[in-house]
Image (cartoon, rainbow, N blue to C red):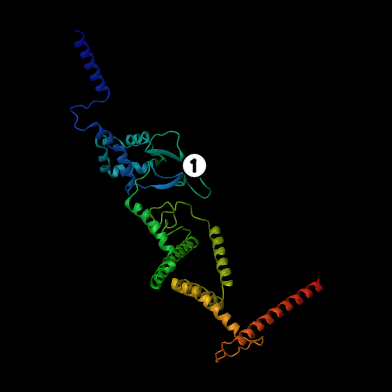
Amino acid sequence: MKKPGGADKKRVRRSSAAVQNGGRDPSSDTPPRKQAAKKDVFQLFAEKVRDHKELVSRWAVLQETRVEYFRGKDFVNFLKNHPEVKEILESEKNLEVEEIADVLLSKNLLVRCDRVVKTIRPGKKKLSTWPAHLEIFPDQVFSDNDAFFAWAFVKRRPLWQTLLSFFWPVLTLAICLFPVYPHRCKLLILYSCAGVLLLILSLLLLRATVFGTLYILLGKRVWFFPNILAEEATLSELFRFWPQKDEEERPKWTTRLLYTLVAVSVILLLRHHAPDEAARLRYQKRMSNIIDDVLEWSPRLALSGFMDKPQDVANVTDSGSNYADGSGEAQPENTHPVEDSGEGDEAVVESNEEDVGSYEEDSSSHGEQKDNHI
């Protein structure tokens, strides 16, 4: 009688433990591991929206961290113009824009921010459209009225960035090995870099000239290629030709006249202190010599020059031994062979002893003169 009761209790405990441990429902087709491994649809939605080119975004500094952010009204317009993006949410695709944004905020995929500078600067009519510095807004609720939202997750790295990180050390090593390149490769790299540098400087000079001319004559601020010097601009925005609309007020005629006088003074000053033709030729010759030394250098020439140095030293010592006395005239070489005899050896030994004795006498006399001088 006790055994059946104990068996029933064990069955009840096992069934309750199975329910508590999350037993699989036979009606569900997806196993629990796959359900846990399935990625959040809002995470996928956030990644899709962030990678989309139609959502206008900028880069700013948020608490010493560089973040990518967008405006609330741009997010609303984006989802209205591209409703197909909401298909990623599956069952949640019927939510409103505000509800979707609130879910992203609750999941810490977005952070609502506010501008740091809230006062209008002198000479402007309104605040900056895209502030460069942000701070966290205390109320993390979506709003499309002058509200900014920064992405709070790390963006997935594209393939080209991975390849660039791999080839960057290779490029650095190739730059370090530039002196051992063939001469034609050196010329190609030199002219390519000089051409790119000349193109950039010409473009900047043209932008400044057009801006100064239109600013002085018409009072308009027109910058062609407005994002060419922007650090936070994307590749597509970097080469955008058409300038943005001028949001500032038109400058006064006194300000334009002042800038005109400054520009004319700078041009006259540069013209007065410009180098003459002779100085330009000297500088060009010196630079061409430096460039030629870099282009014509090769390991063979360096090694041959290094190996020639001991030979040159040996030649100098040999030529010095040919001088018989201090007159500087070289004695002719003796064409007759010296007979191998004992008398010749004794003569050589005696001459060496005389040389050593004379050297000792000279050194002792030099020491006595030094002592007398002291």
The part of the image, by quadrant, that contains residue 79 is top left
The part of the image, by quadrant, that contains residue 89 is top left
Which residue reaches farthest top? 1
Camera-side residue of 283 and 356: 356
At 37% across and 57% down in the image, what residue appears?
A: 167
Camera-side residue of 245 and 332: 332
Residue 306 on image: x %, y % = 50, 73
Which residue reaches farthest front? 342
Q: Secondary structure at mark 1?
A: loop
At 74% across and 78% down in the image, what residue appears?
A: 361
Camera-side residue of 109 and 134: 109
**Across the whole image, how many numbered discs are drawn on residues?**
1
283 sits to left or right of 349: left
Camera-side residue of 368 and 74: 368
Which residue reaches farthest left? 27
Vertical placement of 149 versus 27: above or below?
A: below
Q: Residues within 10 Å of mark 1 (few under 14, many from 20)?
A: few
Residue 36 on image: x %, y % = 28, 33
Residue 181 on image: x %, y % = 40, 69
The part of the image, by quadrant, that contains residue 173 is bottom left
Vertical placement of 55 versus 277: above or below?
A: above
Q: Quarter holding the N terminus?
A: top left
Residue identifier under label 1: 116
Q: Quarter holding the C terminus?
A: bottom right
Say what amino acid the circle numbered 1 marks.
Val
66 sits to left or right of 330: left
Q: Is residue 46 visible?
A: yes
11 sits to left or right of 112: left
Residue 310 on image: x %, y % = 53, 75
Q: Is residue 194 visible?
A: no
